[in-house]
Amino acid sequence: MFILKGISQLEKAITKAKKIRPRVEFDCFGRYRVSGSKGYYTVVCRKDERGYKTVSCTCKGAERGLVCYHSVAALSLHIGLARRQATA
Ligand SMILES: [Zn+2]
């Protein structure tokens, strides 16, 4: 799990996601399934009790606090949905 602070921390993972183009499946708002090398990973985007935006993924990299391309792929969908909700 990592705390989302800004776009700069995501850059490397964005580049990787653009190259790999994982499939992102919508589960419910804030919860997505992203295809990876060993099947699907679940990515959860939420605000914790202190108001931090946190992103967690079930892959090995994210377990160690790394920003993985699954998280970024899910985030791009999540941000789009959140924006649509805000303007609806
Ligand atoms: Zn991941």
Image: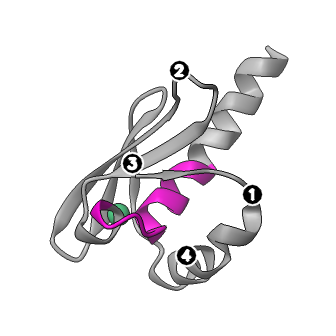
**Image mark for residue 13:** 4
Specify which label sits upstream in the sequence, 2 or 3. Answer: 2
Residue 59 vs residue 20, the one in the foreground: 59
Q: Image height check: is 25 above or below 52?
A: below
Q: Name the residue type under label 2.
A: Glu
Which residue has dot 2 on it?
A: 49
Label 1 Cα neighbours within 10 Å, binned few <14 / some 14-19 / many ≥20: few
Q: Which residue in the rendered view is the most extreme toward the front?
A: 50
Residue 6 numbered mark, or none:
1
Residue assigned mark 3: 56
The answer to which image quadrant residue 88 occupies is top right
Span colored in magenta: 63-76
Seen at 48% across and 67% down, the residue is 67
Q: Nearer the viewer, mark 4 or mark 2?
A: 2
Label 3 near label 1: C-beta < 8 Å? Answer: no
Image depth: mark 2 or mark 3 in front: 2
